[in-house]
Image (tube, rainbow, N blue to C red):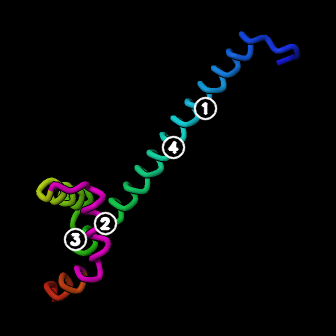
Amino acid sequence: MTKPIDERELAAAIRLAAARHEEFARLEEEVTRAHQALEDRKRVERAKGILMSELALGETEAFRRIQKLARNTNRRLVDVADFVIENETLIAPLLSADRA
């Protein structure tokens, strides 16, 4: 903008700045959601790997079991995955003892 400042130009510049700010805020939210979804997916994949390893399951069956437990307990998939990950040290010895 150049001096003297025209009120209409100032108002337009303010509206444009506000619109860009809102767009930037929406994009930041979207990036945050995408990042969280990726982190959640990584945890589900890790839990799936634990079940595959400890129960000798295929990938599809391991995922199906996580899904079923989530559905049956009314929990999010990632919450069930976290439970499996957090309890891996408890689960593995029990399963190893069953195999022996």
Q: Is residue 83 magenta?
A: yes
Confirm or deny contact between disc 3 and disc 4 (CB under 8 A).
Answer: no
**Start-end of magenta stretch:** 74-91
Identity, as a three-letter code, of the amino acid under mark 1: His
Q: Residue 81 in the image: x percent, y percent? A: 28, 63
Mark 3–mark 4 distance (CA, rounded to whole Å): 36 Å
The residue wearing badge 1 is 21
| Residue at position x 86%, y 17% in the image | 2
Q: Which residue is mark 4?
A: 31
Amino acid at dot 2 = Asp
Please name whichever residue, 26 or 84, is drawn nearer the observer in this view of the structure.
26
Q: Is residue 10 above or below residue 76?
A: above
Residue receiving disc 2: 82
Q: Which residue is mark 3?
A: 56
Give the percent coordinates (x, y) of residue 99: 16, 84
Percent across and percent down for residue 55 are 20, 72
